C-alpha cells in the first residue's frame, strides 16, 4: 500500500468551499502573508470554540 502525499492527506480532511468575505477582511488576511487561507480557517475554528453550533 502506498503512502499518501501531503497534498492527498490535506485533501482527505479539507473540502473546497466558496465564501464571500468583505474586501477589507480579505485584504487584511492576504496582507498577513503566505498561508492566509490557513489563518482564515484558524480564525473560524477559534470562533466555533466560543459560540454554540447551530
Image (cartoon, rainbow, N blue to C red):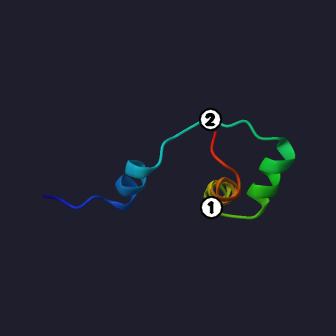
Numbered marks: total: 2
Label 2 crowd (10 A; few <14 / some 14-19 / many >=20): few
Whether label 1 touches label 2, CB < 8 Å: no
In-front residue for pair 48/2: 48
Quadrant housing the C terminus: top right
Pinpoint residue 7: horizontal percent, then vertical percent: 40, 56
Residue at 62 percent of width and 61 percent of height: 35
* Alpha-carbon span between mark 1 and mark 2: 17 Å
Q: Quadrant of residue 23?
A: top right
Quadrant housing the N terminus: bottom left
Residue at 82 percent of width and 49 percent of height: 25
Q: Residue lying at the far bottom in this picture: please name it.
A: 33
Q: Is residue 17 above or below residue 3?
A: above
For disc 2, the marked residue is 18
Q: Tell me: 32 left or right of 24.
A: left
Pinpoint residue 31: horizontal percent, then vertical percent: 79, 60
Q: Residue lying at the far right in this picture: please name it.
A: 24
Residue at 73 percent of width and 36 percent of height: 20
Decide which of tag 1 and tag 2 comes sooner along the chain.
Answer: 2
Pinpoint residue 3: horizontal percent, then vertical percent: 23, 61
Q: Which mark is residue 51?
A: none
Residue at 52 percent of width and 40 percent of height: 16
In-front residue for pair 50/13: 50
Q: Residue lying at the far left in this picture: please name it.
A: 1
Q: Which mark is residue 35?
A: 1
Label 1 crowd (10 A; few <14 / some 14-19 / many >=20): few
Instruction: Report helix, strand or loop for mark 1.
Output: loop
Q: Nearer the viewer, mark 1 or mark 2?
A: 2
Amino acid at each position: 500500500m502506498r503512502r499518501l502525499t501531503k497534498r492527498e492527506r490535506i485533501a482527505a480532511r479539507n473540502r473546497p468551499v466558496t465564501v464571500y468575505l468583505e474586501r477589507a477582511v480579505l485584504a487584511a488576511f492576504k496582507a498577513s502573508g503566505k498561508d492566509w487561507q490557513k489563518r482564515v480557517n484558524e480564525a473560524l475554528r477559534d470562533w466555533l470554540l466560543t459560540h454554540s453550533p447551530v
